[in-house]
Each structure stands twice: as C-alpha cells, then as structure tokens.
Amino acid sequence: MVPAFIVILVVIIFGLRREGRIVREFLQPEVQCGVLRPQSTSSFAVSLGGWVIVDALTRGGMGHWRASRQFNQIGSELAFHRSRVARGILSSEEAARERKLLLAVA
C-alpha cells in the first residue's frame, strides 16, 4: 500500500504543477493589462490548499471565502478554456464563452 500511496502523491503533485503552469501561461494577458495580479494567478491552481482557505477565512469570514473560491474557479476555468482552444480541442467560435468568463473575472 505504501508504494501505491507514494505513486498517487507524485501524480497529484505533478498534476498541480501542470495546472499552475497552464493558469499562469493562459492568464498572462490579464496580468499584463492589470486585471489580475501575478500572485492571484498562482493561487488559482492551488485554491484547495489549506493556506488559501485559512487566509480567506481570517480576512473576511465565510463570505470572503466563498467569493474567493468562486473567483478562483472562474479564473481557472478561463485558463483551461483558452488552453483547450489553443490545442484545437474547442473551436475558436467559443469566443462567447471566453467573453462571459472574462467579464466574470473582471
């Protein structure tokens, strides 16, 4: 069981690192325009991490935590949407969805 546990941990760590790279790469235009801070893009992929949760709860309670969680979800969704369009999985006609996500992030 221990080797299987270690393999699962390694897969999780590599998955989170990959997600972080995708988010940082595909949200770079918003960082350059000033819509997002560079620190916020790094927190999107690890929004389930304990420190992000504790920070949001201590700053504004449950309401702040919910808003932060929703913001992280929308930002990650936008980054992964752009990634799928760039890889050709989705057609570029999905621009309406991207505009909707951009408005939600802004």
Image: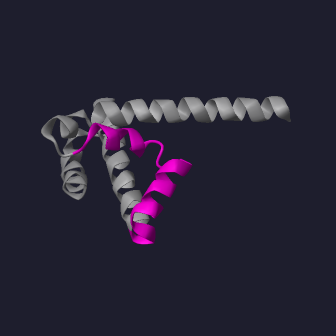
91 vs 74: above or below: above
Q: Is residue 51 above or below residue 41?
A: below
Q: Residue furthest front?
A: 58
Does the stretch in magenta take in 48?
yes
Is residue 28 located in the magenta-colored stretch of the structure? no
Considering the image in quadrants, where does the N terminus appear? top right
Quarter of the image for residue 38 reads top left
The part of the image, by quadrant, that contains residue 42 is: top left
Residue 45, compared with residue 97, is above or below; it is above
Q: Which residues are magenta?
A: 36-63
The residue under the point 54% across, 33% down is 15
Residue 89 in view here? no
Residue that lies at the very extreme toward the left in this rendered image: 33
- Pick whichever, 55 or 76, lies toward us: 55
Q: Is residue 8 left or right of residue 42?
A: right
* Horizontal relation, residue 45 to residue 82: left or right: right
Q: Position of residue 98 (x, y in %)?
A: 23, 48
Q: Main secondary structure of the magenta part?
A: helix
- x and y percentages locating residue 77 in the rendered image: 36, 48
Q: Residue at x 47, y 51 (%)?
A: 52
* Number of numbered markers: 0
Which corner quadrant of the image does residue 21 belong to?
Answer: top left
Compared with residue 87, is residue 30 higher up or lower down, i.e. above or below?
below
